[in-house]
Image (spheres, rainbow, N blue to C red):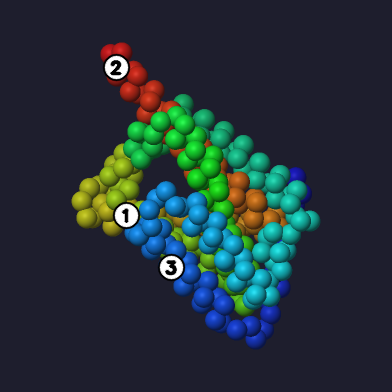
Amino acid sequence: MVFTITAPEQVSGLPWWPLMLVIVVLIAFNIVNNRIAPQGHYLLWAFGGSFGLLAIGLLDGNSWTNMGLGWSYLVPGFLWGVGCIIVVTVGYLVAATFRRGRNAMQDERVAELSGPRLMFQALVEVPFGTVLFEEIAFRAVLFSMLARRFGVVWAIIISAVLFGLWHVLPSIGTHEQSAALGSVVGKGRRGNILAVVLTVITTTIAGVVFAGLRLVSGSVIAPMGLHWATNGMGYFFSWTIIRARRRRRRRA
């Protein structure tokens, strides 16, 4: 596997407004997507938002390579991404052999999905909606703009924290949908607050890992692979575990 460290060079005197514009766009997108727009339009919002953010990044002077989208890093990014998918899948398989692992993966949000709907969500909505937009936003455009203004270390920290805060709205109420999370944080308002805080912390850490993959591979395809594996494979395993338990209960 190819190992490189590729990061945008810091440039002095860059204007602040393009960076602020990207952050404002992300806030607006987050609110619209989680509180206003119909869920069926999510893919259109994701595609439109991705292209819009890339346009801002290019107007700000970021090259495709700066944003982790250079052709010369396509193969290393793909190899790292495939490697991440394999590692995560093996991790899920190992965890599924233990009761605690199966309990941790049980998510009631996917329990009622039909097989075709599950496939669409895991293979279309997650990779071409969630993963595409969030990696373009946080590891391509935002990361490059931050690195060119403040350096790589601050780019990792700030982009990861913003990525964690990005998950505040979608994490509200998740303690009631995930048995494993609910057992940790409890119920009611206190459980809801703890669930949000825990989600922000874990996704901030994930943001650091994703940024690291983007740096060592030179491509956002690497964190895309890991991002999809944790979400998409998580849906598959959760759905399979819930359905298997229901079949066993019907037989009993």
Q: Is residue 100 left or right of residue 11?
A: left
Nearest the camera: 54 or 140? 54
Residue 184 drawn above or below residue 115 = below
Q: Quadrant of residue 29?
A: bottom left
Residue at which label 1 appears: 172
Q: Secondary structure at mark 3?
A: helix
Residue at which label 3 appears: 27
Residue at which label 2 appears: 250
Mark 3 and mark 1 lie on one chain; the one further toward the N terminus is 3
Q: Which circle marks residue 120 in the picture? A: none
Using the numbered discs, state the Cα–Cα distance from disc 3 to disc 2 in whole angstroms. Answer: 46 Å
Q: Hey, what amino acid is under mark 1?
A: Ile
Position of the C terminus by quadrant: top left
Extreme residue in the right direction: 72
Nearest the camera: 210 or 247? 247
Residue 230 visible in the picture: no
Residue 231 lies, in percent from the top left, at: 49, 44
Q: Is residue 37 left or right of residue 137?
A: left
Mark 2 and mark 1 lie on one chain; the one further toward the N terminus is 1
Crowding at dot 2, Cα within 10 Å, few <14 / some 14-19 / many 20+, comes out as few
Which residue is rendered at x = 66% and y = 71% of the image?
Answer: 58
Q: Which mark is in front, 3 or 1?
A: 3
Q: Which mark is in front, 3 or 2?
A: 3
Q: Secondary structure at mark 1?
A: loop
